[in-house]
């Protein structure tokens, strides 16, 4: 009997975005700051037979250091049966970007959105030079999804006035001068949990695409967006969707349900809660993947 050989495909962001463009879909980019979330995302992608991006944000460093989880993410991608990009999300310093590249990440995002345009441009150029030496891709951000990039909120429900919608003409100059592979645009989304219904401007996406030669647009802060608006965003040219908050919430609900199912006096084991959380996250990720792929 012949043994079935699985093909490992560790790809760059540019390569996975080319696949998304051909299919006119968006690829899900899921933060995996722990083993449970990584297991959930990888299993979901393989079951759905869809390409996927696993990513780690610099703000997650206190949860589990990149030096520990990073090599595990790369190894998981190498063993996968679907195309996987290992991406650094919201890298805030060039030193941190280099750390990810040295660990084998195939893509990095430099987030200079809180800096002046000139500083963002200069540092993004450096990030592109660094990535080229490793054969990796680069995502950058122009505009701002709000001051709380980590998804934390103050619970006030107030609109974040630090949001800055991306200027398509400025985006065209930025892309031309930096040579990036994808651009995170601000068109009305917000990181974390939505406290009010988002007002999305899809014309921003369309104009950025038109002026940059159809460069892949990245959607951050998509957890609370409706299915209809997701479809509109993808039709407008969004090719990568960052997704974590609702996946993380699903894991919390899964662990809570496991805890509540215990009989009085029954011992609580962390391993049981962990497995329940991973299972719940996996189902949430599968649903998100189908949505992004317009299935």
Image: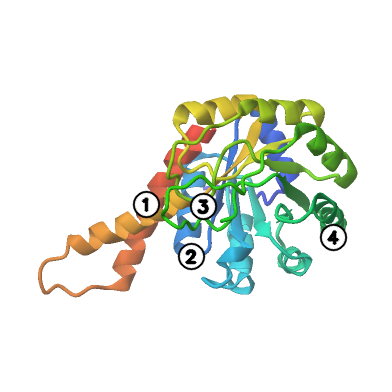
Residue displayed at 54% across by 45% down: 190
Task: Classify mark 2: residues with Cα within 10 Å, few (<14), some (14-19) or many (20+).
Answer: some
Could you say where residue 275 lies in the image, as x and y percent from the top left? Answer: 35, 62
Residue displayed at 45% across by 44% down: 194
Please determine whether, in this image, residue 127 is positioned above or below residue 6.
Answer: below
Q: Sequence-wise, which precedes: disc 3 or disc 2?
A: 2
Identify the element where label 2 is drawn: helix
In three-dimensional space, the C-alpha distance between marks 1 and 4, rounded to whole angstroms, equals: 36 Å
Q: Is residue 61 visible?
A: yes
Report the residue marked by disc 4.
130
Q: Sequence-wise, which precedes: disc 1 or disc 4?
A: 4
Could you say where residue 239 lies in the image, as x and y percent from the top left? Answer: 64, 35
Report the residue marked by disc 1.
250
Q: Sequence-wise, which precedes: disc 4 or disc 2?
A: 2
In three-dimensional space, the C-alpha distance between marks 4 and 3, rounded to whole angstroms, equals: 28 Å
Report the residue marked by disc 3.
42
In three-dimensional space, the C-alpha distance between marks 1 and 3, rounded to whole angstroms, equals: 16 Å
Disc 4 vs disc 2: which is toward the camera? 4
Identify the element where label 3 is drawn: helix
Label 1–label 3 contact, CB within 8 A: no
Task: Classify mark 1: residues with Cα within 10 Å, few (<14), some (14-19) or many (20+).
Answer: many
Label 1–label 4 contact, CB within 8 A: no
The label on residue 35 is 2
Q: Sequence-wise, which precedes: disc 4 or disc 3?
A: 3
In three-dimensional space, the C-alpha distance between marks 3 and 2, rounded to whole angstroms, equals: 11 Å
């Amino acid at each position: 009997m012949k043994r079935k050989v699985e093909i490992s495909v560790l790809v760059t962001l540019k390569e996975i975005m080319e696949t998304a463009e051909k299919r006119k879909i968006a690829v899900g980019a899921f933060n995996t700051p722990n083993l449970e979330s990584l297991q959930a995302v990888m299993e979901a992608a393989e079951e759905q037979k869809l390409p996927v991006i696993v990513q780690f944000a610099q703000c997650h460093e206190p949860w589990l250091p990149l030096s520990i989880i990073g090599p595990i993410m790369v190894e998981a991608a190498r063993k996968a049966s679907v195309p996987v990009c290992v991406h650094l999300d919201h890298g805030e310093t060039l030193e941190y970007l280099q750390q990810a590249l040295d660990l084998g990440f195939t893509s990095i995002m430099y987030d200079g959105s809180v800096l002046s345009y000139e500083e963002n441009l200069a540092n993004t150029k450096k990030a592109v030079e660094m990535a080229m030496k490793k054969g990796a891709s680069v995502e950058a951000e122009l505009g701002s999804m709000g001051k709380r990039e980590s998804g934390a909120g103050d619970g006030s429900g107030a609109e974040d006035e630090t949001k800055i919608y991306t200027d398509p003409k400025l985006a065209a100059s930025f892309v031309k001068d930096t040579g990036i592979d994808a651009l995170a645009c601000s068109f009305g989304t917000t990181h974390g949990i939505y406290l009010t219904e988002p007002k999305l401007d899809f014309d921003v996406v369309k104009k950025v695409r038109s002026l940059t030669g159809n460069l892949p647009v990245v959607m951050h802060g998509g957890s609370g967006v409706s299915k209809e608006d997701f479809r509109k965003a993808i039709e407008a040219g969004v090719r990568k969707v960052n997704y974590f908050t609702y996946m993380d919430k699903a894991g919390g609900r899964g662990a809570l349900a496991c805890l509540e199912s215990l009989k009085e006096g029954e011992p609580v084991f962390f391993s049981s809660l962990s497995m329940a959380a991973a299972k719940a996250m996996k189902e949430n990720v599968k649903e998100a993947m189908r949505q992004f792929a317009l299935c």
